[in-house]
Image (spheres, helix red, strand yellow):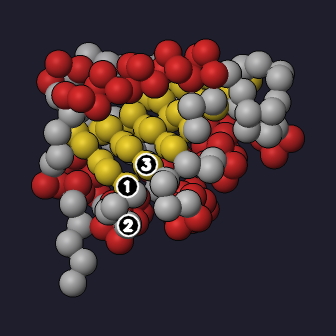
Amino acid sequence: MIDFSDYDLGQSTDGAINISTRQENADAALELVSQTRQKISIISTELDPFVYDQPEFVEALRKVVIGNRYAEVRVIVFEAALISRRGHKILDLAGKLSSFIELRKASNEYRSFNEAVMIVDEVGYLFRENRERYKGKVNFNSRRESKALLEVFNAMWETATPDPNLRRVLI
């Protein structure tokens, strides 16, 4: 088991850390978001419930957003209807903090995109080559790789669209 709390976002110089289990993915995602100051960008087919629908992760995300008035959380998903049907804590949080958290559905142009990605503060990332598997890597300090992943994210973001399934109306 890897202790990700030993790594500091933007400081650690150990390079990429290979991960291979659901738990390592969840732990890495939580630690990255816990250390994030402002920007989080996620590409996930169905917002992997084991990684992103955990109370600790959503609370860390909430703290980023309420702790910085310039916070920006952008999420691209492929299965908006499935996420809405199943329910997701990030959808609930986005409904309460819609000025800071935006979810969009990926365009058909990217339907063959098979990776899962989270980029934080343009310096750290969690990356899986295959969205169906948990084998991947996490890096707490790689501006170069984070920038390359962010370029892919931004290209997808430009063609992604809001989806009614990704909105929660609070009454």
Query: Residue placed at 48% from the left, 30% from the top?
Result: 117
Left or right: 70 as drawn, with respect to 82: right
Separation of marks 1 and 2 at Cα, in angstroms = 6 Å
- Quick one: 15 or 137, which is closer to the camera? 15
User: Which label was assigned to residue 19?
Assistant: none
Residue at figure coordinates x 21%, y 33% from the top left? 160
- The C terminus - image quarter: bottom left
* Dot 3 or dot 1, earlier in sequence: 3
Task: Looking at this view, name the residue that lies furthest to the bottom.
Answer: 171
Q: Check if mark 1's residue and mark 2's residue have beta carbons within 8 Å.
A: yes
Q: Earlier in the sequence, mark 3 or mark 2?
A: 3
Q: Which residue position holds label 3?
A: 73
* Circle 2 SS class: loop
Identify the element where label 1 is drawn.
strand
Q: Which mark is residue 101?
A: 1
Seen as rendered, the residue at the extreme front is 70
Task: Indicate whether 160 appears above or below 13.
Answer: below
Residue 52 or 100: which is nearer the viewer? Answer: 100
Q: Position of residue 1 (x, y in %)?
A: 80, 38
Q: Amino acid at mark 3?
A: Val
Q: Are marks 3 and 1 in contact (CB under 8 Å)?
A: yes
Q: Residue 146 sits in which quadrant?
A: top right
**Mark 3 burial class by Cα count in 10 Å: few <14, some 14-19, many 20+:** many
Question: What SS does tag 3 mark?
Answer: strand
Q: From the viewer's perspective, is residue 45 above or below residue 55?
A: above
